[in-house]
Each structure stands twice: as C-alpha cells, then as structure tokens.
Amino acid sequence: MSQYSIRDLEQLSGIKAHTLRIWEQRYKMLVPKRSDTNIRTYSDQELKLLLNISTLKDHGYKISEIAKLKESEIKEEVFSLSDKVMQYSDQIQALTIAMIDIDEQSFETIINKNIETHGIEKTMVNVIYPFLTKIGILWLSGSIGPSQEHFITNLIRQKIVVEIDKLPTNYDPNAEKVVVYTPEGEYHEIGILFAYFIFKNMGKKVIYLGQSLPFEELKFIIEKEKPNFVFSAFTSFSTSQDVQNYITKMGTTFHDQTIYLTGMQVVSQKLELTKNITIIHTVNQLIALGANS
C-alpha cells in the first residue's frame, strides 16, 4: 500500500493543504496517520475518498453536504455523474483511482470513450498528458511504486500503438523523413510514441527506433537515412549534467541536422543548446511541429 503526504493529496486533488487540514478537524472526513514528528501520511483509501469528494465538489456539492454521506454513498454519487458528460478534471481523477486500484476496466472505459468522442490527439492533450504530469511527480517523490506507474503507462502505450497501426504508411521516397527515439538509458516511451502518431498522421515517413538507442546506432541511421529532422525525449535520463553532455554531443556531431527535443529533463532546466536544437515545451507545440515541419 502506498503512502501519500498532504502535499501529494493537494497535487492530485487540487484541494489546498490548508483546506484539507480544516476538513480533517471540522468534518473528520480524513484520518491520517501521524509520525513521531506529527507529519501526516495518507493511505490509498483516503486518497480515493478525497478524489471522489473533489469530483462532487467540482459539480456543485457543498462540503457540508458531502460530509454527511457515507463513503459508499459518496461513491454512488460519483458513479451517477458518469452517466453525464464528465469534465476532463473528473476523468483525470478517475484515472488516478484506476491506477491505485490496478483497475484496467475503468481505465479502458474512460480512455475508449474519449478516443471515440474526441480522437487520440485531444485525449492526449486534455486527459492523458495532464494525468501523466501528476503521476510523474508522485513517482519521482516515491509516493507511488513502479508497478502502478508501469501498469498505467503500458495501457496508455497500447492505446497509442493501436491508433498508429490504423494510419497508412507513406512509401513515397520523397516524403519527409523523421527519426524518433530515446537515448540509451531512457525507457519512457509515451512521448515518442505520440510523436510517432503525430508525424505519421501528417504523412511523414517515420523511422521509429524506440527506447534506449545507443549513440553509435543513432549516428549510423542518420548517416544512412539523412532524415529531415530528429526527435527525442528525455524523461528520467540519469543526471542533469549527463543530459547537458548528451545534448552538446548530439548538437555538435549532427551539426547539419535539425533536432527537436522534449521531456521533463529538457523542459524543466536551462540548457546550453547548439543552433540546430529546439526544445518542444508543450504537446500543442508537438502537434504544430508535425503540421508545419
């Protein structure tokens, strides 16, 4: 069972820590464990309860009314909302609960409905990426385990692969070519898979090399295929200095090559870039890159 700090609950639910403390005192809705130094920790069950409370509150329920309900009644009220059009924030909360419970059926229901209604691009922009941002922070802080993170990211991976397979492959020898990969030691694949979908959907010839590609293999492919540009992502790649060293090596080795990079470790820090490297900060920038490059 995972344990969460009050800051974790604030990050996931959107409810301020100060408000949570007031609710604990006034309504006894959450009963955290306390360490010898009086630090609060919360269980999976309390996180799920809070996410459901947050959902009801977002739909106009007063906290004083919610506090009168049993936990089972709160779940029933949330379930009744699923028959209506759920807001994106509701769906992110529901995905979080699905991750905690290792609940594949709930995940499938939420994501499939979004893809059918809005398509994979809007689903990624409005639901999956905001969800992964929250989960990534918790994973890095150690509040959730690798098994939960792997469970949910592998399900997301499957969805993107299905959408990629639906697209026709461009065999035109004159089509724009793009190499997509992550560097050796980087195993987070969701970002580059979505990039693969975007570029293929725009009619580009995508040379998808997957995760953890050795630098010499990248060099071989670039020299052989001479792509129009290269796309890569850095999410959990060793240290900040290693990221800088790799990017510098990449920019100088392929000085005539246009390179686009994304991921938490390049977006969140100030890096020295060669002129041929551009950082993609948002998913909307990625979509625009696919359309304009």
Image (cartoon, grey):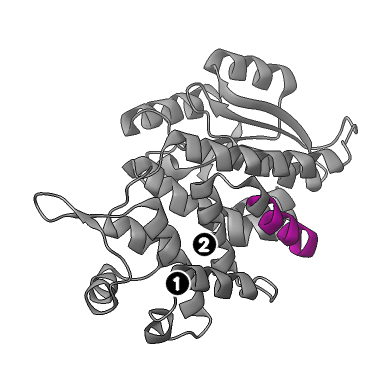
Q: Position of residue 173 (x, y in %)?
A: 88, 29
Q: Give the range drawn in magenta.
A: 107-119
Q: What amino acid type should be assigned to the residue bearing mark 1?
A: Ser
Give me the residue at 44% from left, 44% from top.
264
84 over 167 or under it: above or below = below
Image quarter of residue 161? top right
Distance Cα–Cα, label 1 vs label 2 = 8 Å
Q: Position of residue 67 (x, y in %)?
A: 38, 79
228 over 282 or under it: above or below = above
Residue nearest the observer in this picture, 275 or 241: 241
Task: Evaluate if marks 1 and 2 touch, with contact meaning CB atoms under 8 Å apart.
Answer: yes
Question: The N terminus is located in which quarter?
Answer: top left
Q: What element carries label 1?
A: helix
Residue nearest the observer in this picture, 276 or 212: 212
For disc 2, the marked residue is: 93
For the stretch drawn in magenta, the main secondary structure is helix
The answer to whether residue 7 is visible is: yes
Q: Is residue 286 magenta?
A: no
Q: What element carries label 2?
A: helix
Q: What amino acid type should be assigned to the residue bearing mark 2?
A: Gln
Image quarter of residue 213? top right
Q: Residues within 10 Å of mark 1 (few under 14, many from 20)?
A: many
Give me the residue at 45% from left, 54% from top.
134
Give me the residue at 64% from left, 44% from top.
156
Image quarter of residue 95? bottom right
Left or right, 176 with reference to 279: right
The tag earlier along the polypeptide, 1 or 2, is 1
For disc 1, the marked residue is: 54
